[in-house]
C-alpha cells in the first residue's frame, strides 16, 4: 500500500510539472535551429537521418510483404540461426518470414531479438521501449542484434512528447521502467577509442511500415 501511494505521489508531481510550463532560464542562449521542428522535413526523414547518424540501420517499407522480404534477406546474409520474437502481434505480421523464431530467448545463444517499441523520437533518433512489452527488459539489451518493427504513427517529435504520451496512460498502466535507446551500444572510455556493442547490442535495426 505504501509503495502504491508513493508511486502515485511521484506520478502526480510529474503530471503537475508537465502541465505548468516554466520560463526558459536562458532566453538569450544560442540554440541551434536543428533543435526545433522543421516543416520541410518529415518525422520519418528526420528520424532516419538522426538514427543512421548514430550507427543505426533504418529501412522504410510501404507494406508488410516488403518488410518480410527484407527481414528474410537480413537473416540469410547474416546467418542468424536463433531469432527471438516474443510479441504475438509481430509474430502474426512476420508469419511468412524465413528463420527459426523462438518464443523465449536463451541470452547465450540468441543471435537477434525482434521487438516492437512504444515510440520513436525523431529529434534524437531514439527508440523508446517499455518493460510492459512482451519482450521485457533483458531481451533488447543483451542480444547482439536488436531489430525493431515500428510504424510511422509511432513517431513523435521530441522526448517531451514521448513522455507526455506515456503519462496519458495513467498511473495504473505506467511501466516499471522505460528505456530510451539511441542506436547501438557504444563507449569511448578505453583510451578514447570508440567501441560498439559493449553494454548492449552491437547492431540495431529499425524496420518501419509507413
Image (cartoon, helix red, strand yellow):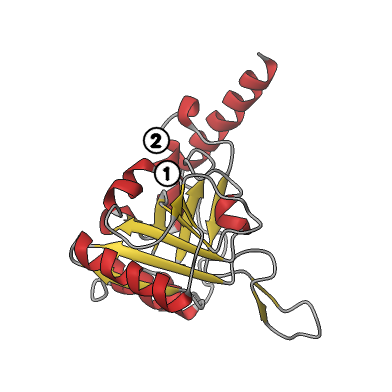
The residue at 22%/60% (across/down) is 64
Q: To which quarter of the image does residue 209 belong?
A: bottom left
Q: Where's the C terminus, which quadrant?
A: bottom left
Q: Nearer the viewer, residue 50 or 138?
A: 138
Instruction: Give the total of numbered labels.
Output: 2
Q: Give the SS element for disc 2.
A: loop
The residue at 29%/46% (across/down) is 92
Q: Give the SS element for disc 1.
A: helix
The residue at 40%/74% (across/down) is 76
Residue 69, image x, y percentages: 27, 69
Is there any visible trace of residue 123 in the rendered image?
no
> Which numbered circle lies on residue 51?
none
> Which numbered circle lies on residue 168?
2
Q: Nearer the viewer, residue 125 or 132?
A: 132
Residue 194, image x, y percentages: 68, 83
Say if mark 1 contacts mark 2, CB within 8 Å: yes
Left-right relation of 208 to 28? left
**Label 1 environment density (alpha carbons within 10 Å; few <14, some 14–19, many ≥20):** some
Q: Nearer the viewer, residue 200 or 47?
A: 200
Tag 1 residue:
164
Name above or below for residue 154 compared with residue 177: below
Q: Residue furthest right?
A: 191
Is there any visible trace of residue 186 in the rendered image?
yes
Amino acid at each position: 500500500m505504501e509503495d502504491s501511494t508513493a508511486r502515485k505521489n511521484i506520478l502526480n508531481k510529474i503530471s503537475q510539472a508537465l502541465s505548468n510550463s516554466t520560463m526558459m532560464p536562458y532566453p538569450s542562449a544560442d540554440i541551434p535551429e536543428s533543435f526545433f521542428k522543421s516543416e520541410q522535413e518529415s518525422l520519418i526523414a528526420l528520424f532516419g537521418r538522426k538514427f543512421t547518424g548514430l550507427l543505426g540501420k533504418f529501412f522504410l517499407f510501404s507494406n508488410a510483404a516488403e518488410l518480410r522480404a527484407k527481414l528474410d534477406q537480413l537473416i540469410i546474409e547474416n546467418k542468424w540461426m536463433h531469432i527471438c520474437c516474443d510479441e504475438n502481434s509481430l509474430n502474426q505480421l512476420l508469419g511468412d518470414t524465413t528463420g527459426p523464431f523462438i518464443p523465449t530467448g536463451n541470452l547465450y545463444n540468441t543471435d537477434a531479438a525482434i521487438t516492437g517499441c512504444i515510440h520513436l523520437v525523431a529529434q534524437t533518433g531514439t527508440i523508446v521501449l517499455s518493460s510492459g512489452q512482451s519482450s521485457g527488459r533483458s531481451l533488447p539489451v543483451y542480444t547482439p542484434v536488436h531489430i525493431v518493427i515500428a510504424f510511422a504513427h509511432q513517431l513523435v517529435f521530441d522526448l517531451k512528447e514521448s513522455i507526455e504520451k506515456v503519462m496519458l496512460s495513467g498511473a495504473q498502466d505506467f511501466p516499471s521502467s522505460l528505456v530510451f535507446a539511441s542506436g547501438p551500444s557504444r563507449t569511448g572510455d578505453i583510451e578514447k577509442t570508440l567501441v560498439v556493442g559493449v553494454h548492449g547490442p552491437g547492431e540495431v535495426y529499425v524496420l518501419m511500415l509507413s
